[in-house]
Each structure stands twice: as structure tokens, then as C-alpha cells.
Image (spheres, rainbow, N blue to C red):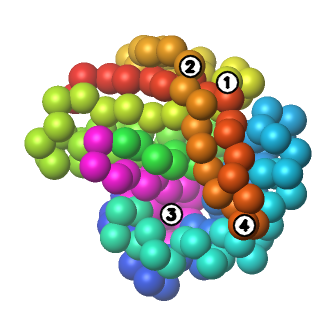
């Protein structure tokens, strides 16, 4: 049995580990090389604690982290499922939780950015009723450098 709950401070190290692994699985070869190099495990551990307030985690009965979502305003910023939980139906549950949070905050629609080359994620979001609303040059800063990743903006009424 899996439960989804708000993250606590004690969850954030495991979130950082899973986020690092999942980010590299999904983004390798699809973002600028310098960005991939800057996304180190210590970098994820530095940035993750500040996100505890907008993170929800999926955990197993024994408390193991299976996945997480991060929501900021009307943006579903992060959706990641650990390797062992992929294909189990957890991702739709996490995405539905994110959609619920966006709606509960009073927004009528949600949006998210997907790296253009991540075909698996794009198929997943489309299967969940999200619509590709066009190109989005997503700007990020990592390792003291600014990068622009080629993304697609997906939207959904909530």
C-alpha cells in the first residue's frame, strides 16, 4: 500500500537522492551538457530542503520513498517516481495530487514544463489529459551558470 502525504524535513534527503537519479534518467542527452554536469547529488541536497513546503511524497508501508511531486502556485514543477516504482501506477496518483493542490489553491488550470526530448514523459502527460501548448525555453541557473533547456509547456484545466 502506498500513501501520499506532505513532505517533512526528515524526507528531504531521500527526496534529493530520488530527484537526482530521476532527473538524470529523464534529462541526459536532452539538456545542455553543462546543465547535466552541474546537477550533482550535492547540488540536489543543497536545494531540496527549501522545497519541503511544496513537496508531497509517496511512501510505502515501511516508509520508503517511492516518488514525489513539487507544486508552486499553478505550476507542477516536479513529478518523479523512483526506478523501482515506475510502471506501478504511482505516477498518475502523484500527478492527480499535484492537480488537486493547484485547484485547491484557486487556480483553474495547471501547467508544467517537459524537456522536449523526453518522449516518455510527454506521452505520460498526454495520456493523463494534459495538452502540449507549445515551446517553452525554460531558463535555469545551476552551478553559477544560466542555461536554457528546450521544453514544451503542458497545460490542463483543474
Label 1, secondary structure: give it. loop
Relative to 117, residue 54 above or below? below
Name the quadrant containing residue 99.
top left
Do callouts 4 and 2 mark residues in contact (Cβ within 8 Å)?
no
**Circle 3 is placed at which residue position?**
60
Given this view, does label 2 or label 1 mark the residue nearer the observer?
2
Foreground disc of the pair 3, 1: 1
Labelled pair 1, 4 in contact (Cβ < 8 Å): no
147 or 90: nearer the viewer: 147
Which quarter of the figure is the C terminus placed in? top left
Residue 87: % across, % down: 63, 35
For disc 4, the marked residue is 144
Q: How many other residues sit within 10 Å of disc 3, few (<14), some (14-19) or many (≥20)?
A: some
Asked if residue 94 can be seen in this view, the reply is: yes
Q: CA distance from mark 3 to mark 1?
A: 31 Å
Q: Residue at x 15, y 46 (%)?
A: 104
Residue wearing tag 1: 116
> Dot 2, how many residues are within 10 Å of its Cα: few (below 14), some (14-19), or many (20+)?
some
Segment tinted magenta in the rendering:
56-74
Q: Is 114 situated left or right of 149 in this image?
A: left
Q: Earlier in the sequence, mark 4 or mark 2?
A: 2
Asked if residue 19 is positioned above or below residue 113 in the image, the reply reads below
**Residue position for label 2:** 135
Q: Earlier in the sequence, mark 2 or mark 1?
A: 1
Residue at 52%, 34% in the rendered image: 113
Q: Nearer the viewer, residue 56 or 54?
A: 54
* Residue 67 % position (x, y): 54, 55
Q: Residue at x 41, y 43 (%)?
A: 76
Out of 47 and 62, give the one closest to the viewer. Answer: 47
- Marks 1 and 4: which is nearer the front? 4
Amino acid at each position: 500500500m502506498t500513501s501520499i502525504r506532505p513532505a517533512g524535513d526528515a524526507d528531504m534527503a531521500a527526496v534529493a537522492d530520488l530527484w537526482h537519479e530521476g532527473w538524470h534518467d529523464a534529462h541526459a542527452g536532452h539538456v545542455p551538457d553543462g546543465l547535466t554536469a552541474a546537477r550533482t547529488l550535492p547540488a540536489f541536497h543543497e536545494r531540496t530542503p527549501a522545497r519541503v513546503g511544496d513537496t508531497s511524497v509517496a511512501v510505502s508501508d515501511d516508509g520508503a520513498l517511492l516518488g514525489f511531486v513539487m507544486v508552486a502556485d499553478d505550476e507542477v514543477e516536479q513529478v518523479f517516481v523512483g526506478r523501482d516504482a515506475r510502471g506501478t501506477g504511482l505516477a498518475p496518483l502523484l500527478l492527480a495530487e499535484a492537480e488537486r493542490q493547484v485547484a485547491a489553491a484557486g487556480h483553474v488550470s495547471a501547467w508544467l514544463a517537459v524537456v522536449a526530448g523526453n518522449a516518455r514523459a510527454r506521452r505520460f502527460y498526454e495520456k493523463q489529459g494534459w495538452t502540449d501548448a507549445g515551446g517553452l525555453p525554460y531558463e535555469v541557473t545551476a552551478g553559477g551558470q544560466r542555461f536554457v533547456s528546450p521544453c514544451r509547456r503542458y497545460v490542463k484545466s483543474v
